[in-house]
Image (cartoon, rainbow, N blue to C red):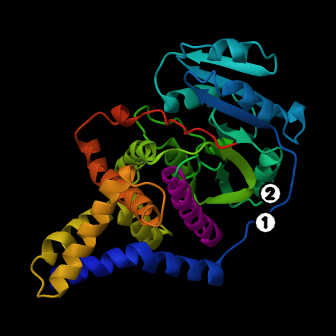
Amino acid sequence: MWLFLAALLLAAYILFGWPLLLGLLARCFGRPVKKQFQLRNVTAIIAVYNGEKFLPRKLDSLFAQNYPQDLLDVIVVSDGSTDRTDAIAAADPRVKLIRVERGGKCLALNAGAAQAHGEILFLTDVRQELDGECIRNLIANFADRQVGVVSGGLKIRVGDSAGSQDVGLYWRFEKWIRNQLSLLDSMFGATGSVCAIRRELFVPIPADILLDDMYLPLMAFFKGYRLVIDESAIAWDLPTSVDTEFIRKVRTLAGNYQLLWHFPSLLMPFRNRMWLHFVSYKMGRLLLPWLLLVMFVSGFFLPAPWRIWAVGGQVLVYLLALLDPVIGKGPLKKLSSPARTFCVMMLAAAIAVRIFLVDPRSLWVVTAASKKAD
């Protein structure tokens, strides 16, 4: 019984208790960024592999920015692309094309940063289109000398399935957490598709790093800088399915394990000023599926009727998740679809431990977007 209760209380803290505590601390002790728009030289770097489908619109959204074009350089780093990516980038005289052998996003970013001259590096992916005020709003945050990295607000377009909408709901919760962390002090990374960093804080990223958008910001964090988010700097992304999100989540959660090797100070209260939140958030997410497993197994040893509630409740959620693909629209779908999304995320967290058994780069899979709603 005590094992079940301990796992239940810890899981409840991770899922509900810590977010409530975070929100309270952010409200009481939050430190808003001292924003002021100041013109700065910016270099936008797009690391891309076979992005011909998205690159024209991406470049259009960059050159449509409400920002002086003479202060904005654009570098496209083609990571061994085999489609028309190189030709599209080379055809625009405003774009500097860098061709590199296929080596992954990290090495492509390193190549772009090595030839960048802007005071601020704007790191962005090819798929997301940018709002016209995106760069301008990002840059305003650097008037605060404590700010080293700024993420924009990634908005997901409405999807065409219940699964993609539940992923969107999950993403909105994640954004709320990041906003509270940012207000309190710092997030533990950035949104890789819309991220600005002071050029002097950029360091070469190891080739096998799975989360470049955490590695770089954490380097700045441990130098004393804040990692913040500005929701007014908007990038628009296409929705993804639950299955696609599962693949991406395995990579990101595996990347958290990997980062502990590079940043052991994350687990040291006297070195990490956001230690409580890192352990509750990032480590908690990795621990959660194993807590559910402990609850399930130990639930069989509870006295009746608690055994029925403890085990039956989990079985019901898992059955709803398994049946979701064949359940049509209706009241039951409103329960099965969120249950499937939750279970997929928990399964991804459990599978993430495979990073200890395989080459980390084998976990890199290009995220496939769902069909955009009209």
Which region shows up in magenta?
162-188
Q: Within the image, what quadrant is residue 266 found in? A: bottom left
Circle 2 sits in a helix, a strand or a loop, which is it? helix
Residue neighbourhood size for the residue with mark 1, other residues' Cα within 10 Å, grouped as few (<14), some (14–19), many (≥20): few
Q: Which mark, residue 87?
A: none
| Amino acid of disc 1 | Lys
Q: Which sits in the foreground, 205 or 152?
A: 152
On-image quarter of the N terminus: bottom left
Q: Is residue 327 left or right of residue 329?
A: left
Q: Within the image, what quadrant is residue 70 found in? A: top right
On-image quarter of the C terminus: top right
Between the C-alphas of marks 2 and 1, the distance is 7 Å
Q: Position of residue 75 (x, y in %)?
A: 70, 26
Q: Is residue 147 above or below residue 351?
A: below
Q: Position of residue 251 (x, y in %)?
A: 39, 43
Residue plotted at (55% across, 55% down): 165
Regarding residue 59, the answer to whether it shows in the image is yes
| Residue 163 lies in the magenta-colored region | yes
Residue plotted at (76% across, 51% down): 138
Comes first in the chain, label 2 or label 1? 1
Circle 1 sits in a helix, a strand or a loop, which is it? loop
Q: Which sits in the foreground, 221 or 369?
A: 369
Query: Which residue matches tag 1?
Result: 34
Q: Is residue 66 left or right of residue 241?
A: right
Q: Main secondary structure of the magenta part?
A: helix
Query: Which residue matches tag 2?
Result: 143
